[in-house]
Every structure is written in C-alpha cells, then in structure tokens.
Image (cartoon, helix red, strand yellow):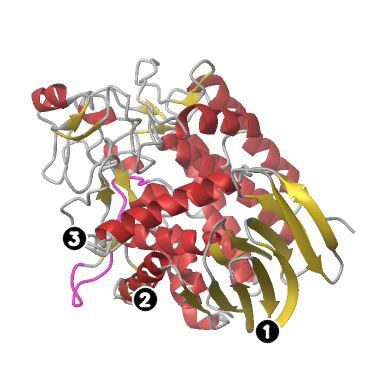
Amino acid sequence: MRDLWNIEQYSFCDSGVEFTTEREDIQYIFDACETYCKENIKSFHDYDVLIEGSKYNGVWLETQPLGGEMYAKRNMKIALANILIFMRYQRRDGKYPGMISRKNEWDGITPHFDWMQGCFLPYPALKMYYHLGKDRAYLQMVYDSLKDYDDYLWRYRDSTGNGVLENWCIWDVGEDNCTLHMLHGLKQPENGLWGKSTPPEDYGNMPHKSPQYMGYSYAIRCVLAEASRILENGEEDAWKEKAEFVRQKAFEYLWDKEKHAFFVRDRNGEFVYALTQENIKCMYCGLFTQEMADQFIREHLLNEEEFWTPYPLPAVAANSPYFHVNAECSNCADELEKSGAAAHDLDDNSWSGPLNGLIYQRSADALMRYHHHYETVLIGEKLIKLLSKEKKFVQNYNPFTGDAANGMDGYGPTMLAALEYISILCGVNISCDKILWSCAPNMKAFTYTQNMYGHKYTLHSDGIKMYGMIDEKQVFSASCGVRIETDMHGKLLSMYGISEDAVTVSVDADEVHMETALSVNATWTIAN
C-alpha cells in the first residue's frame, strides 16, 4: 500500500526558471533571490523544507505552506514537503501545529501546538494536486486533513456560540508586536501563546472575534468544495453552503458597513478600530465579495493617508491611532511606552506599521482573486524599487523612507514575494491548469522561461510586442502592457488590463485575431 507520508512515493517533474532582462534592477533582485532562497532549504528529517529564513529556523503555518508552493516553480519536492509536514504532525483532534522547529542537526522535530499561527495551507495544498499530475490519493488526504481542521475550529474557537470564530492569543494570528494587542494590555511572550482548549479570561481584551479566522474557514471550505467536485464524493454543494454561511456571518458581525473594512471585536463584543493588513489576509482567503473588495481597495488600499504610502502596504494604516514604526514615525509612541508591552524585537519583527514581506507575499493572489490586476503592477514596481534601493531582504521596511529594519538578511517571504511579482510583471505564472503571461507597461526587453511538467513555457518581449511560446513553438503574440491567460496548451482564455490608461491591444493566435481597447482592470473573456 502506498505510504502518502513518504515523499519518495510521489512523482515529481523537474521545474526551474530562467530569466534575463534589460532592467538591471529586476535582474539584480531575481538573481539574488534565486541564490538566497536555496540557503533557506533545510533538512527536517524525512523532509527537506524551505524554512522562513532570516532568524526563523523553522516552518510556520502562516508562511511556509504558501511559501513552499510558490517555490514549486523551482523545486516541486520542497513545495510538497512544506505542506506534508503540517498534515503529518496534525493532532488527532484536527489541530495543526502553528510552528515546527528543529534547532540543530542533532535535534528532533518539535511541533508546537500552544498557538494557531493562522492557516495558509488550503489553497497551496490544492495547487499541489495539479503540480503532482492530479494525484487523487493526495487530494483525498488533503480533503480529510482540512475537514478535520475545520471541525476543530468550529468545535473550539466559537466559545460564545454566535457563529464567529475567535483568536485567543497574539501568536494565533502571528502578528507579533502589534499595537492592536500591545495597547490593550497584551505583551510577549506572556500573552503570545495559549494552549488550553478553553478561552483565556485574563488576556487583555482577548478573545477576539476574528475576521481572519473566518477567512481561514472560508478558504478551507472552498477548497473542500473544489476537492469534492474533483473526487465526486457528493459533498460539493454542502461545502459551498457552509462556506457561504461563514462569509455571511463575517459580513454581519465583523464588517463595518460605513468604514468598508473588517475589524476584530473584543471580548465584550466591541469593535477595535485598528485598520490593519488583516483585510488583505481576508482577501487572500476569498472572504470578501467583489463589491467589498472594490470598496476596500478604492477607499483604503489606494488611499495615500492609509495603505498607499510611498512604499505601500504598511501593517497598520498610516493614519490609524494604532500606527507605529519607531519613536519618530508613530501615532502612539507615548501610549506604547506607557504600556510597557513592547518586546525586544519590535524594530525588526513588528506588525504595528512597517511593511512586512509576508504582506507582499499574500497581496498578489489577494488582488488578482478580485480582478485587480493593475494594482499588482503598481505594487510590484514599488517592491522592485524598494529592494533594489536597499539590497537587503529583511522582514520589515519603513513605509515612508523604505529603509530596511536592522534584521537578519535572507527573509524568505520577502524574497518569494519578489520572485512572484517578477513573474506577474514580466513573465510566466502557472497556477492549477492555467497560465498567466504578463508584460507590464514600459517594460524593457526580457525573456522568461518556466520549466514545468516536461515543457518550456517562454515569454519573450522586445519592449513593443510579447510572444508566448510552449516548447519553442509560438502560441500567441500580443501588444505589451497586457496580461493574458491561457490553458496549459496555450489556448487563449482571457485578457486583463494592467495599464493605467486604456490601450489598444492586438492579439494573434491560432484561434484568435483581434484588436481591441482594454481599459484598466478590464477583463476580456475569449470564447470560441
């Protein structure tokens, strides 16, 4: 009988990326990240995994399933290991370890269950099904695992029974040194973890009714519905209904209809009006409706006084009373000092205001899920500007100056986010059974090749037109300044407007010869 925990029992294809461009800033970042990411591959006994990197010698549920799957473009075996390891150490009651560590080569593996640490496993686990050649046995294992975890959430994390999930400690959400917690009497490590099966009673204003935990359950149930469709187990409609229940409850209880954003509610049921990147997590999970996403992006994400700082996406909106980067860049420095809650690593591991590589890592999928393709170009270019200026890959950066925090170099999520954004600025990005071919406006000549599934998927641009090729056979040509979606054989499916102004796009393929105006964030679906 096949041992699904044994990674050698799976069939892997070789993968890798080749990239050259006349843009020196992008080339530098690509080459550096390719090199440094390899240094984050470590042996955890049966699995070689991609650790979080920098000072974090372990894998966390909020970072590494997503980071591992992003690395599938370069190493499929590592990608699978980053998912299997969490399912393998899942407790019998369904709970995943929030963290798995191994300090030294001679130490054993240590799963940590005293906190939750978010859950960014469902979508990467589903994508791995496609990377593994649609391995049904693997998908069934994912289905069983996610079902058990969702059951755990609803059995333990709705302590009031009102249909809204809770987080019980700081590390449940992985937002260390966040003023949302510190200004309400919570500090680390005292309030970092909580391992009991009943909620805390003396943890500041905890437990929090949590938008992001509603998002995690929503994502789990969406993946369970899709897995049910593939496995034909008759549960697809039931999981869709359960997912919609979560979305409606979140909207009714945690969405402020005037502020157009999600906020936590404290143990007394009161909103805590800290406008944070938690909303981007919820977008990544798919918890927003299209209308909610449009409102949040228009009113908050692109607001220069909130999240659209010179270097965008601070962890807390810049005009929020909870915003804090340092003593000179803060809206609450005096209150924070009086609280006495700041931990020793506030400067290089803070969710109170600095940019964080993890926010960028989640943002691309969050935005494209809601057809905001143009914003991915804006953010990608800002990230390139930041990293080429600093030439350091750390966890935190100042959102106004771009200065890197004094943390260790080699932070994995920052590097993986950079590589991902390069692929959707000027390259090829394969997800499930579809391919995105992108050439952002004003991009200099480049050639990007994704080796995967025994084929070469190449996008070449001379700065005027781009040419998509599969195994050196051209499948389409198109004007630059557009993002094109195809199936795995190169058949055109959709086009997305990624230019600020409307552009005239010409496309030539075997089945399509067209010229049309494409406005910002417009989607053209190509039929027949």
* Residue 385 location (% of width, % of height): 36, 55
* Residue 412 location (% of width, % of height): 33, 62
The numbered disc on residue 239 is: none
The numbered disc on residue 471 is: 1
Q: Give the structural element (helix, strand or loop) at label 3.
A: loop
* Residue 366 location (% of width, % of height): 53, 45
Q: Give the structural element (helix, strand or loop) at label 1.
A: loop
Left or right relative to 520: residue 303: left
The residue under label 3 is 408
Q: Nearer the viewer, residue 182 or 45?
A: 182
The residue under label 2 is 48
Name the residue located 15 percent from the left edge and 53 percent from the top edge: 406
Marks 3/2: CA distance? 22 Å
Name the residue located 63 percent from the left edge and 46 percent from the top edge: 222
**Crowding near pointer 3: few (<14 within 10 Å), some, many (20+)?**
some
C-beta proximity under 8 Å, tags 2 and 1: no
